[in-house]
Amino acid sequence: MNTKIISLWSGPRNISTALMYSFAQRSDTQVVDEPLYAYYLQYTGIKHPGNTEILEEMETDGEVVMKGIFNQEYQKPVVFLKQMAKHLVGLSEGWLLRGENIFLIRDPKAVIISFAKVTTPTFEEVGIKQQYDLYQYLAKQGKKPIVLDGREVLKNPNKILKQVCERLQIPFEESMMQWEKGSIPEDGVWAKYWYKNVHQSIGFQPYKPSTESLLSEHRGLWEECKPYYDFLYNFALKA
């Protein structure tokens, strides 16, 4: 079977899980939840909720993970990998040339505010620079990856997902627009710490501007991240 492998390279605290749930509803698609998570935790030494569980359950050699993704046989013709851009740290960017790539971005201000509710945000953890670097790498290789902005997706998910499917050369399926409440079997072991909102949803939630303010101690971090976000937002599909 000639498999189309799609990597969604997201930053944290975005709608990446909702997009994974959306693609999981497709009749032709198998989804994989953050296959490089354990590698990232071991490589960086960063501690996240569920750290021990993740390291015990998953492969921690990033090269082994990526080789496995592209060398195994799949039962469906489309494979959707929910990935975090920062998880590719220390690995070859060349892996991106072996599949389709989507970048999911979000205003760093909103990312930082959301991240701070769970753990301390840092420049590396926000991940926008990694997304920028990976985009630039693909551009230099003559590739034109898809860029999605979480806000734009939520404004009109039907329109944006139809554009995504067209770019990927796969048929749009109406089933992508909703799912049942609760978890899915493909959820990572970390779902109980991070996926509460998605588990309570049955589809993409309408976009609502945040009323929360950035803490003063995080303003410098936001200013450091913003230029990379602004660059990528220029290429994002618009609602």
Image (tube, rainbow, N blue to C red):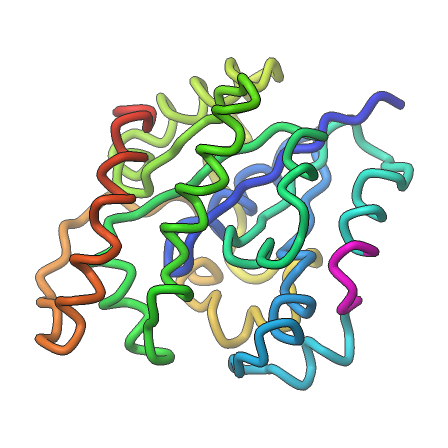
Q: Position of residue 88 (x, y in %)?
A: 60, 54
230 vs 209, left or right, is right
Residue 71 falls in image quadrant = top right
The answer to if 84 sits in the magenta stretch is no
Above or below, 216 relative to 81: below
Residue at the image position 18 percent from the left and 72 percent from the top: 218
Question: Could you tell whether 9 is left or right of 216 in the image?
Answer: right
215 lies left or right of 239: left
Residue furthest out toward the bottom: 52
In the rendered image, which quarter contains the N terminus? Answer: top right
**Residue under the point 30% across and 47% down:** 106
Q: Residue at x 50, y 40 (%)?
A: 134
How many numbered dots are placed on residues in this image? 0
The front one of 225 and 84 is: 225
Q: Quadrant of the C terminus?
A: top left
| Quarter of the rendering containing residue 77 | top right
In the rendering, at what x and y percent does residue 112 appear?
26, 65
Q: Which one is in front, 170 or 119?
A: 119
Q: Residue at x 70, y 32 (%)?
A: 5
Q: Residue 235: where, in percent of width, then height? A: 32, 25
In the rendered image, which quarter is residue 20 located in?
A: top right
* Range of magenta residues: 59-64
Q: Position of residue 9 (x, y in %)?
A: 51, 44
Left or right position of 52 against 236: right
